Image: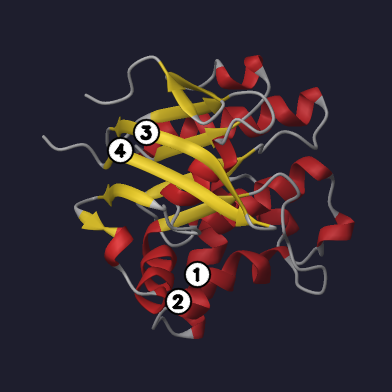
């Protein structure tokens, strides 16, 4: 069976002030459907860049990148935006919740890009909040929630479209240990009970150990085998 995510000879570089700056070098990597992967490496190793490429936020400079059979390198910007909306759920370190919206409204946001009517959108958002244990906080705004609760709202938002892939960039980096453990336990459930494919960037070895597979980057290069 083909891997859900397949990268071959992937490279990414930037041009800054007339200088060519390579960030990722010749990455070969396969990630299976239902896998739970952590990306680790020192600052500047390219792990967040790689996560952005997997999520279709950025495009590689060279090489191929296929997700669920789709060559996302070949997509136009509009096609790529539609693909992200349908296939990727995002979890960020600093939650990225809109302060003027309630928890329910924040979770509902990705569904505004779909053809669902308002009643159905609200039902889906409520189910997602229930899944992360926050049904009793649906009318609270972010400033009325703890950091751990805000991150759980962000996870509900990532889940609400039933994405193919969940990408998490330092999801526990702004949390105390207890809140971080709660968020990691929730991500374990998403993987174990819902079979979600999760790719997580982290600098925390304890966080990385919760994933089923650790991938290390060093100066833009994959350390050890990544491709099947």
Question: How much space separates mark 2 and mark 1, taking CA atoms?
Answer: 5 Å
Report which residue position mark 4 lands on.
Answer: 9
- Residue 32 higher or lower than 141, as above or below: above
Q: Which mark is residue 123?
A: 1
**Quadrant (top left/top right/bottom left/bottom right) for the C terminus:** top left
Relative height, residue 160 to residue 223 (above, below): below
Residue 41 appears in which quarter of the rendering?
top right
Q: Is residue 69 visible?
A: yes
Rate crowding at label 4 as few (under 14), some (14 to 19) or many (20 or more) other CA atoms within 10 Å. some
Nearest to the eye among marks 2 and 3: give it: 3
Relative side of 3 to 214, left or right: left
The mark that comes first in sequence, 2 or 3, is 3
Q: Earlier in the sequence, mark 1 or mark 4?
A: 4
Q: Position of residue 206 (x, y in %)?
A: 65, 15
Instruction: Confirm or deny contact between disc 2 and disc 1 (CB under 8 A).
Output: yes
Q: Which residue is mark 3?
A: 27
User: Which residue is denoted by mark 2 in the rendering?
Assistant: 120
Q: Distance from label 1 to label 3 (Cα)?
A: 41 Å
């Amino acid at each position: 069976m083909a891997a859900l995510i397949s990268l071959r000879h992937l490279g990414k570089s930037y041009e800054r002030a007339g200088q060519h700056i390579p960030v990722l070098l010749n990455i070969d990597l396969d990630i299976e459907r239902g896998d739970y992967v952590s990306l680790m490496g020192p600052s500047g190793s390219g792990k967040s860049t790689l996560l952005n490429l997997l999520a279709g936020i950025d495009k590689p400079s060279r090489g191929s990148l296929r997700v669920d059979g789709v060559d996302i390198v070949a997509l136009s910007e509009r096609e790529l935006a539609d693909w992200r909306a349908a296939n990727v759920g995002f979890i960020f370190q600093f939650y990225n919740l809109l302060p003027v919206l309630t928890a329910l409204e924040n979770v509902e946001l990705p569904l505004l890009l779909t053809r669902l009517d308002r009643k159905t959108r609200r039902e889906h958002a409520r189910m997602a909040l229930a899944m992360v244990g926050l049904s009793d906080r649906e009318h609270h705004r972010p400033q009325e929630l703890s950091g751990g609760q805000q991150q759980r709202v962000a996870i509900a938002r990532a889940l609400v479209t039933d994405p193919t892939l969940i990408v998490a960039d330092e999801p526990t980096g702004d949390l105390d240990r207890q809140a971080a453990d709660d968020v990691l336990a929730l991500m374990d459930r998403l993987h174990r009970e819902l079979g979600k494919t999760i790719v997580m960037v982290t600098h925390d070895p304890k966080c990385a150990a919760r994933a089923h597979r650790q991938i290390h980057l060093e100066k833009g290069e994959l350390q050890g085998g990544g491709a099947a």
